[in-house]
Image: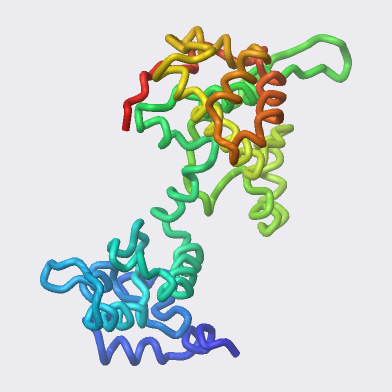
Amino acid sequence: MKLDKLIKDSKLVERLDKLDPDNASGSKNDGINYWKGKKIVTLAEWKRRLVRGGKLLQKGTEEDQRIKEALQFFPDDYEHPLFPLAVQERMEVAKKWYNQYLELMYFRENLKCSRLLCYKCLLCPDKEKSGQYVGISRLVARAIEINNEKEYDNNSDSETSTTTPSLYPCSVLNRFKCPYDRREMNKKPKHQKQLRNEEEDSNSIDVDYLFLLSAYSYRVELAFIKPRKEKSIVPIKNVEDIYNALTDRETLDKILEQGLDEEHLKYKDEIVEFFMSIKDRVRMEDLTFYKPTDA
């Protein structure tokens, strides 16, 4: 039997917490006070084990010992970055521990951790808060919406339009409760699967697809930085220029060729094909023009 299950199923946790109430986990709603054989303490207490007297860790024997002591516990909440810079430089020491810490956050479906996992999804609006993006994620999300899905009546050829809630921004923003995660839905009871199918109708958007489109959008955002900052083969001076570039194959190809590095450039052709497939649904009002800073 695994140690975690043995500890959870026994009354050992309760006895230990009675002996050491000051260090008992502040979060007992899931009944887990130990993880991978290590006690869960509050995030504040765990950080005090790393930083003493208000001084950040430096390199040295004493600091190494403090790191080892801290790694005998897990904090009960998520924080990023968790370690001071001096510890991050030696993360090999804590790599296994950190993976187990993330497993704990996933197990508890920690909201802070969940929000960070959502960041790379197409439907997460957090990226736009930087004031540097032109709104490609928003534009793509709204282009793939089933806002005016045409339905044919079974008894006639007449068309009717239906309106579904807007995809962007996501109303959930919780990776552990993602409404587009088919794998998670397959784990649910049959009646819950049927309820979801009724709600979503023909909406077949999947979380993996959303992350793929987010990666496309990010690369396009990168490619648009140079044309907005300096002389370019395709100058971008306003929203209309962005719209024209996104809906013209040759122009978009040139911008991607100019603005992407070798790592991202290998996706150029499939990005162009995707944007040409949605160009009739691209709306200029979804775009915003920002002049990039030099930072």
Residue lying at the far left of the rendered structure: 53
Residue at 56% x, 13% y: name it: 283
Q: Is residue 274 visible?
A: yes
Q: Is residue 288 above or below residue 46?
A: above
Q: Quadrant of residue 126?
A: top left
Q: Is residue 24 visible?
A: no
Q: Is residue 185 left or right of residue 35?
A: right
Residue at 45% x, 24% y: name it: 225
Q: Quadrant of residue 132?
A: top left
Residue at 54% x, 40% y: name it: 121
Across and down, in percent, residue 91 comes to 40, 69
Colour scheme of the picture? rainbow
183 or 224, nearer to the observer? 224
Across and down, in percent, residue 72 comes to 36, 82
Residue at 34% x, 92% y: name it: 15
Q: Is residue 29 above or below residue 8?
A: above
Across and down, in percent, residue 174 comes to 48, 48
Residue lying at the far right of the rendered structure: 155
**Quadrant location, the C terminus:** top left
**Quadrant location, the N terminus:** bottom right
160 or 213, nearer to the observer? 213
Across and down, in percent, residue 198 comes to 70, 38
Q: Is residue 182 left or right of residue 48?
A: right
113 or 215, nearer to the observer? 215
Q: Is residue 140 above or below residue 235?
A: below
Q: Is residue 231 above or below residue 261?
A: above
